[in-house]
Image (cartoon, rainbow, N blue to C red):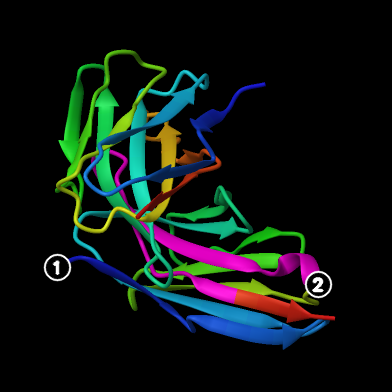
Amino acid sequence: EDKVVQSPLSLVVHEGDTVTLNCSYEVTNFRSLLWYKQEKKAPTFLFMLTSSGIEKKSGRLSSILDKKELFSILNITATQTGDSAIYLCAVLYNQGGKLIFGQGTELSVKP
Amino acid sequence: DGGITQSPKYLFRKEGQNVTLSCEQNLNHDAMYWYRQDPGQGLRLIYYSQIVNDFQKGDIAEGYSVSREKKESFPLTVTSAQKNPTAFYLCASSATDTSSYEQYFGPGTRLTVT
């Protein structure tokens, strides 16, 4: 059975800390891996990773995919309270645009 | 402004009643999706539709039904057969060309059944 597993499930840090969120997957017909941030309601798109070893960056956030070991990490440097959210990892299937999500990591950044 | 709207934001129903959640998009996307989110379980796919008048069951379709009569609209009915309907429901849409499968989400509907 296909699955996506995120760790840790929750994390509490202080402003300025650096965090690493993990996402491992076992999915047949893998196309890409996506990261989303969910603050209160709608998840918002962060990154889509298709190729191994190529880091994607957006400000203090970065992510990389390892297709050999079947995992991805999302790094957040110099965390701020506005980074507090649930971070969702999802794998896109090769056909049909269907996504399978992990459980999410709930990040709380304290002042 | 392009986007996805869901209504209502909060919905309360008595057990045994069917309820329909609305999802509308003006992004000109062919594909639309319904997810359910429970605490600690991430998002689980209920139904999805790649094109008008066609839809497929997701991982947890039992107790739900959908229709796709228009490209812009993909309503979800939570029937009385759904054993545990209280949850946060998210609708999403995406293009279907292979370069752009990113899904855009609506603001969600929180359904409480008592």
| Residue B17 spot, x, y in % from top left | 25, 39
Q: Are marks 2 and 1 on the same chain?
A: yes
Residue type, numbered disc 1: Glu
Chain ID of residue with mark 2:
A
| Residue A16 spot, x, y in % from top left | 83, 82
Residue A93 visible in the picture: no
Is A46 covered by the magenta stretch? no
A77 sits left or right of B35 in the view: right
What's the residue at 26%, 49% (across, down)? B15
Q: Which residue is mark 2?
A: A80
Identify the element where label 2 is drawn.
loop
Residue A70, placed above or below residue B29 = below
Is A90 covered by the magenta stretch? yes
Chain ID of residue with mark 1:
A
Q: Which residue is mark 1?
A: A1
User: Camera-side residue: A106 or A68?
Assistant: A106
What's the residue at 77%, 65% (across, down)? A82
A44 sits left or right of A1 in the view: right
Q: Which residues are magenta?
A: A81-106
Residue type, numbered disc 2: Gln
Residue B64 visible in the picture: yes
